[in-house]
Image (cartoon, rainbow, N blue to C red):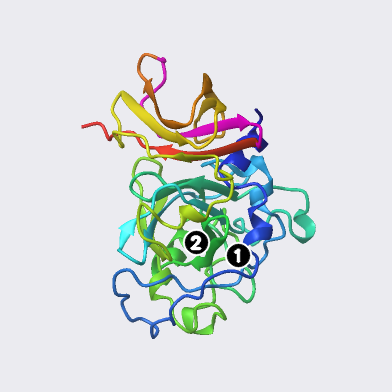
Amino acid sequence: MDRKDFLRGLGIAGVGSLVSGSFLKAEKKTAVGQLPPNCTLIPTETAGPFPLDLTENATFFRQDVREDRTGVQHNVKLKIIGAENCEPMPNVRVNIWHCDKDGNYSGYQTQSGLTYLRGYQMTDVNGEVEFITIFPGWYNGRICHIHFQVYVSSVYAAISQLTYPIDVKNQIYADYADLYTKGADPLNFNNDNIFSDGYAFQLATLTPNADTGGYDSYLEVTVQGSGITGLAGLEPETGGQFKLGQNFPNPYSTATTIPFRLYEPSEVQIDLWDFSGKKVATFPQGSLLVGEHQVALDIKNLGLATANYIYQLQVINANGTFRQGKVMSAKASL
């Protein structure tokens, strides 16, 4: 199985056509400067310069999206929360994309055919995704920002943008003037056509990182859904052939178990992928009957690092081939 099949099994390949025009509306933005209450839906924003469908291209399943772009290292963490019960949402897909230090987007205008500063990941047990990128520049008419899209299921996604405290952001441009040669961002929130009606839910933290010499950002993003369950029941990829459960324990230390139920006799295989999109292990299960099943994995004995992985169940029977994946999270070391 290649990466395209893997991504299709995660509900990524082909998602773009399903969610178009079906975004649920977010609540009205707060007044400028007002602090957001907990678990308020992220405002819906335009996709902007987004000619590339990340969901159709396996290249973008990655954490480090920099490629050849120069700039201050910028680690971005997003935490996805379900509005219905205010709990983190694991196993949802998150895309990000943004301009480079000079205000250019890959795949757009003169950058056609390029793929830098775009990527997607799946949230872990804490509802979090992390990306390694560069701090974005700005371009005429828009304040510095990053686009992101949250796919809760193949039939529902939320799209928005994040931005930063103006003083900290412009200090980065001043401190690294040799890289960010356009100077300070001339706009503020009031004269940006996206954030002028409110930005409180979209203002990410921006703090120095002594280890990388760059900066870290963090934003909590609330979308439609209910924590662990989310809207995953709407996923069509399983075709009614099976139900894939969450591994347990999760987070795990060295070993974990993957539960699933078959609704048709099937040939079953489990694949393990790291977050760079590389398949690291395959576990053929042979022909299994209808009913509940479990597969135990000892990560340590497999010679793999204790880390976050995506496990994917592949089911083949008379009705076709069906796949679905979830994230197994590693327990933080003490």
* Range of residues picked out in magenta: 302-319
Count of labels shown? 2
Find residue 320 and report its horizontal and vertical position in percent.
67, 36
Which one is nearer the viewer's eye here, 234 or 95?
A: 234
Identified at 31% across, 37% down, the residue is 250
Quarter-of-image position of residue 244 = top left
Amino acid carrying label 2: it is: Tyr
Quarter-of-image position of residue 316 = top right
Q: Where 7 falls versus 142 (above or below)?
A: above
Which one is nearer the viewer's eye here, 266 or 148?
A: 266
* Residue 309 visible in the current orientation: no
Identified at 55% across, 66% down, the residue is 183
Which corner quadrant holds the N terminus? top right
Q: Where 199 falls versus 300 (above or below)?
A: below
Q: Does the CB distance between marks 2 and 1 fall below 8 Å?
A: yes
In the picture of the structure, the residue carrying the numbered disc 1 is 182
In the picture of the structure, the residue carrying the numbered disc 2 is 173
Task: Classify residue 108 as left or right of residue 315.
Answer: right
